[in-house]
């Protein structure tokens, strides 16, 4: 069985709209599983350069799937280890929720494997 690693990653500026109002962080942080393939999330890493708690949200087809709180000036590493399959046609995205008016930078790295 062949597999291909996929990554949604980078450093992104943001402005918060409220911790209860997650929204897309960047178009670069969206990926659609090719038809006929299956994907699985393997890990999430994130870093927060601000002095406030933020939350990165893994979204599946427009619905929040997992929440990753990232502490003030902190980081997080969450091994996901094959929690569930993402069938072909599924779109995954990373969104961000932050306190209203908070601006700063976040570093994200979501590792997936396409099978």
Image (cartoon, grey):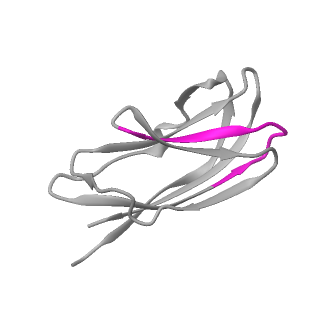
Q: Is residue 108 magenta?
A: no
Question: Residue 73 placed where, x, y %?
Answer: 82, 48
Residue at 70% x, 46% y: name it. 70
Residue placed most toward the observer, 84 or 111: 84
Q: Is residue 32 left or right of residue 73?
A: left
Question: Residue 108 placed where, x, y %?
Answer: 60, 52
Q: Is residue 103 above or below residue 100?
A: below
Q: Within the image, what quadrant is residue 67 found in?
A: top right
Over which residues does the magenta segment extend?
46-60
Q: Is residue 67 left or right of residue 31?
A: right
Residue at 54% x, 54% y: name it. 9
Residue at 20% x, 59% y: name it. 37
Residue at 33% x, 69% y: name it. 4
Q: Is residue 25 above or below residue 71?
A: above
Q: Is residue 26 above or below residue 2?
A: above
Q: Within the image, what quadrant is residue 22 found in?
A: top right
- State the residue lying farthest toward the bottom: 1
Q: Is residue 69 above or below residue 101?
A: below
Q: Within the image, what quadrant is residue 12 found in?
A: top right
């Amino acid at each position: 069985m062949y597999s291909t690693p996929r990554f949604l990653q980078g450093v992104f500026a943001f402005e918060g709209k409220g911790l209860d109002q997650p929204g897309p962080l960047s178009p670069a942080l969206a990926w659609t599983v090719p038809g006929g393939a299956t994907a699985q999330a393997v890990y999430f890493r994130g870093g927060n350069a601000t002095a406030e708690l933020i939350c990165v949200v893994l979204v599946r087809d427009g619905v929040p799937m997992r929440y990753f709180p990232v502490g003030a000036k902190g980081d997080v590493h969450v091994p996901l280890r094959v929690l569930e399959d993402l069938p072909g046609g599924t779109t995954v995205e990373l969104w961000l929720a932050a306190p209203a008016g908070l601006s700063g930078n976040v570093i994200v790295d979501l590792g997936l494997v396409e099978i």
